[in-house]
Amino acid sequence: MNLLLTNPALDDAILQTKKRLHDSRLEHLRGTARSRAIAHADKEYQRHHQVQSNLQAISTIIDQFFCSYDALPLKRYIRSSISMYINTNQYHNAEHVLQMMLDSAHLMKNHGILLSSEEGRGQLKRSLIAGMNHDRGNGRHPDLVPGRDEAAAVRELLQDIQQSRLEEDCQSPHLLRTLNDDDIIQVCGSILGTV
């Protein structure tokens, strides 16, 4: 069963994603300001010692448990996803996200999950993806309606997964394209569980 093709709500999300892809061409014209904001955030994060330290620690964990073929897309995804957390002064920033990802990996190790096993690596990958996306799009202050921020983060992640599957460039496999339906359910469930 292919979860992304048989669920009516997701089919609607796919149609909306296609429309957004069309609209994104128009948005590209307006994207210069956002690109500048992302570049500014990247510059800020490069100067931020804790962000760089956490990135290095996560990279070390990934290198420890994944072969280079699997590690590289995961590290690229994490590095490129930091730009989702543009405002370096808000609580929901890259430092918070990376620290949560590190804490998740340490909890898994400390609770006896064998990260060197195939199952353990799968859990670690899902945990890192959920951690990277759990506060996606949040502003300076959380939404007052419990769960709304998390639901929005899941919607955006599902759109990215669908987009990765629609991309024709298969020369460099996108990390999200490798997620199966069970992975998607677990990642989304983890994000929704942060309410």
Image (cartoon, rainbow, N blue to C red):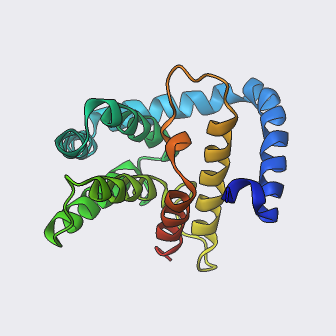
Q: Quadrant of the N terminus?
A: bottom right
Q: Position of residue 33 (x, y in %)?
A: 64, 29
Give the number of marks. Answer: 0
| Front position in the image: 118 or 115 | 118
Residue 146 lies, with reference to residue 45, above or below; the image says below
Q: Is residue 7 left or right of residue 63?
A: right
Residue at image location 36% in from the left, 54% down from the top? 122
Q: List x then y, in percent, for residue 124.
A: 32, 56
Left or right relative to 62: residue 21 = right
Give the quarter of the image for residue 143.
bottom right
| Residue 18 spot, x, y in % from top left | 81, 40
Above/below status of 168 relative to 124: above
Please indicate whether residue 19 sits to the left or right of residue 107 in the image: right
Give the image location of residue 140, x and y in percent. Answer: 52, 60
Of all residues shown, which one is farthest toward the top?
A: 171
Above or below, 101 against 41 in this view is below
Q: Please name whichever residue, 151 or 12, is drawn nearer the observer in this view of the structure.
A: 12
Identify the residue at horizontal 64%, vertical 79% (top origin). Answer: 145
Residue projecting furthest to the front = 1
Seen in the image, is 134 located left or right of residue 6?
Answer: left
